């Protein structure tokens, strides 16, 4: 199963980099949950394909591209070491994908949160 999950992950990255969001989203389960740490505008947890579409659109606005460096798999978990370029800056990142029945059900990104704040801005804080 690990090789199939790696191939699905590669398909998703290639589609994202090509601007094909429909194909990129096809590797995710309808109830996917993706978490990004930090206080940037893209930090948080995205649930379902509708929220994922919003996240991918935000990334595309800053001409984000992801160069995959290495794929590591153990059963239904795939870890991808990447180099992310957004808004003219580049950093290293690790993404962890958990699969069930051939689709990503959970994803976590571990990257440069300071860069994400510089590129995407900080979360807006509601006045109370």
Image (cartoon, rainbow, N blue to C red):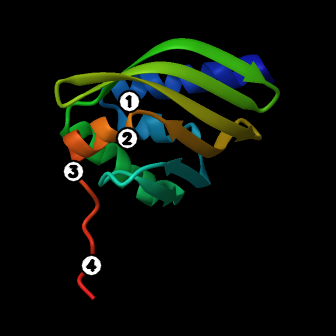
How far apart are labels 2 and 1 at the CA level?
21 Å
How far apart are labels 1 and 3 at the CA level?
22 Å
Q: Residue at x 26, y 78 (%)?
A: 126
How far apart are labels 4 and 3 at the CA level?
15 Å
Mark positioned earlier in the residue sequence (1 or 3): 1
Q: Which residue is mark 1?
A: 16
Q: Which residue is mark 2?
A: 113
Is the C-beta separation of discs 3 and 2 under 8 Å? no
Mark positioned earlier in the residue sequence (4 or 3): 3
Where disc 4 sits, the SS reads loop
| Rendering quarter of residue 24 | top left
Q: Can you name the residue that lies furthest to the top here?
A: 69
How far apart are labels 1 and 4 at the CA level?
32 Å
Mark positioned earlier in the residue sequence (1 or 4): 1
Q: Disc 1 vs disc 4: which is toward the camera?
A: 4
| Rendering quarter of residue 100 | top right
Quadrant containing the C terminus in the rendered view: bottom left
How far apart are labels 4 and 2 at the CA level?
21 Å
User: Does residue 59 lie above or below 15 as drawn?
Assistant: below
Residue 25 screen position, x and y as percent: 48, 41
Mark positioned earlier in the residue sequence (2 or 1): 1
Q: Which residue is mark 4?
A: 126
Mark 3 Cα-neighbour bin, 10 Å: few <14, some 14–19, many ≥20: some
Q: Which residue is mark 3?
A: 121
């Amino acid at each position: 199963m690990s090789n199939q999950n790696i191939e699905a992950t590669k398909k998703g990255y290639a589609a994202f980099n090509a601007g094909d969001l429909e194909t990129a989203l096809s590797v995710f389960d309808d109830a996917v949950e993706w978490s990004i740490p930090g206080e940037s505008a893209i930090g948080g947890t995205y649930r379902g394909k509708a929220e994922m579409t919003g996240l991918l659109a935000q990334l595309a606005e800053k001409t984000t591209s992801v160069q995959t460096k290495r794929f590591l798999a153990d059963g239904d978990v795939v870890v991808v070491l990447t180099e992310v370029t957004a808004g003219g800056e580049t950093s290293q990142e690790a993404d962890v994908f958990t699969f069930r029945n051939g689709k990503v059900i959970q994803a976590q990104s571990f990257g440069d949160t300071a860069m994400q704040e510089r590129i995407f801005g900080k979360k807006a804080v509601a006045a109370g």
